[in-house]
Amino acid sequence: MLRFSTAGESHGEALTALLSGMPAGLAVDLEFVNRELWRRQQGYGRGGRMRIERDTAHLLSGVRHGHTIGSPIAMQLANNDWQNWTEALPVEEGDPAKHKRVASPRPGHADLAGALKYNFSEARYVLERASARESAARVAGGALAKLLLRELGIEILSHVIAVGSARLEGPVTWEAIQAVATKEEILLSCIDPASEARMKEQVDVALRTGDSVGGVFEVVAHNVPPGLGTYVNWDERLDTHLAAAVMSLQAVKGVEIGDAVQAAGSLGSAVHDEIGYTSGSSFAGFTRSSNHAGGLEGGVSNGEDIRIRGYLKPISTLRRPLGSVDFASREPVKAAYERSDVCVVPAAGVAAEAMVALTLARFALEKFGGDSVLELKRNFEGYCQQVRNF
């Protein structure tokens, strides 16, 4: 069973990712892990925090001589900003006068709900853990899951569909997504330069007016075999877990698999992917004329690319704050402001890749088993041969 968790606060000393259940013998490419962390930090509209942090993963356990050894993997990502917060957020009692209160909750953030839940008099501790800074640890763990899936020929990437009202139209190929993801300079991770220019204008307007802007990203899992997940129980469906994984990301308020939104307003004859057969093609020869289902039918992968979209609300910390209430006086005030981004849609896509990778890796390990990568691949190849002989 693959298990993943994170620990750490936004302005604490470090973030920690813990991953258990990884089979032994996986070659760990630390350069790849760190590039994934770099990708998360890129994008037009990022804030001042990205000029401070240079995320790199420090492996503490579970990897020796460059390979996993089957025991839990612990990774640490140091927060460079910690030096500015050592007196404000000490582990010990410290000086209460140096504590930096979040005196008024931000609309759209976890501030108020978290303070009420945990009986905090203000929202500092809520902000520290609810912050999207935590997603850096997810990306580190997801990078290891990606390396495992690569052993099975599965690749996962993302691209941006929309920023504000600017939207990409037309077909998207896997090769186009690859080209965007491998660029040395990442703007808004859109495959079409003209659409990306319109998206950039949306970010410029938000930046100029002290606002923020959201959008839509799409994660694509390529070369996933049919048969991951099952329809036999509601909590074993692959789409259930993929939707939950993407929805768990900060600021994601909606998830779409395939063309679900468009399909809801269409007739069935225009939605369902017709089945054909071509001898010698991949996965038993069955083909599809389209992929409106997003690679999932009945909670089971069907051999087509898995496509899942996240709908990201605008960041809730605004340079031109909205109205709020002071925690202490209950008087109307403006919401608290801390250094923040204007647009994080490309970064959210990278974090969503990590969550999709962790989910697919867990389902692959549950289906094929194996305490070592060699055993996993042997079981996987046996299954693929079974499907080819269907």
Image: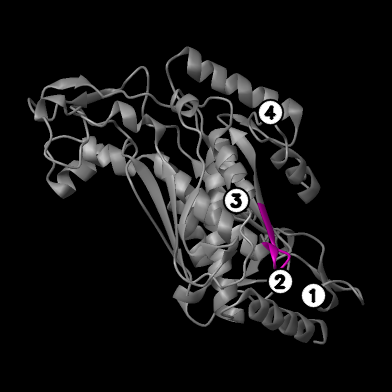
At label 3, which amino acid type do we have?
A: Leu
Numbered-mark total: 4
**Which residue is drawn at the image coordinates 49% and 28% (left, top)?**
50
Q: Which residues are magenta?
A: 150-156
| Mark in the foreground, 3 or 2 | 3
Cα–Cα span, label 4 and label 1: 35 Å
Q: Which mark is residue 14?
A: none
Cα–Cα span, label 4 and label 2: 32 Å
Q: Residue furthest top?
A: 208
Cα–Cα span, label 1 and label 2: 7 Å
**Which residue is drawn at the image coordinates 55% and 39% (left, top)?**
40
- Closer to the N terminus: mark 4 or mark 1? 4
Q: Nearer the viewer, residue 187 or 308?
A: 187
Left or right, residue 22 beside residue 331: right
Viewer can see residue 250: no
Q: Is residue 33 above or below residue 162?
A: below
- Closer to the N terminus: mark 3 or mark 2? 3
Q: Nearer the viewer, residue 109 or 368?
A: 368
- Closer to the N terminus: mark 3 or mark 1? 3
Residue at which label 2 appears: 225
Mark 1 surroundings: few (<14), some (14-19) or many (≥20) residues within 10 A: many
User: SS for tag 4?
Assistant: helix
Residue at which label 1 appears: 283
Residue at which label 3 appears: 30
Q: Is residue 128 above or below residue 70?
A: above
User: SS for tag 1?
Assistant: helix
**Which residue is drawn at the image coordinates 25% and 22% (left, top)?**
323
Cα–Cα span, label 3 and label 1: 32 Å
Q: Which mark is residue 196?
A: 4
At label 4, which amino acid type do we have?
A: Glu
User: SS for tag 2?
Assistant: loop
Colour scheme used in the picture?
A: one colour
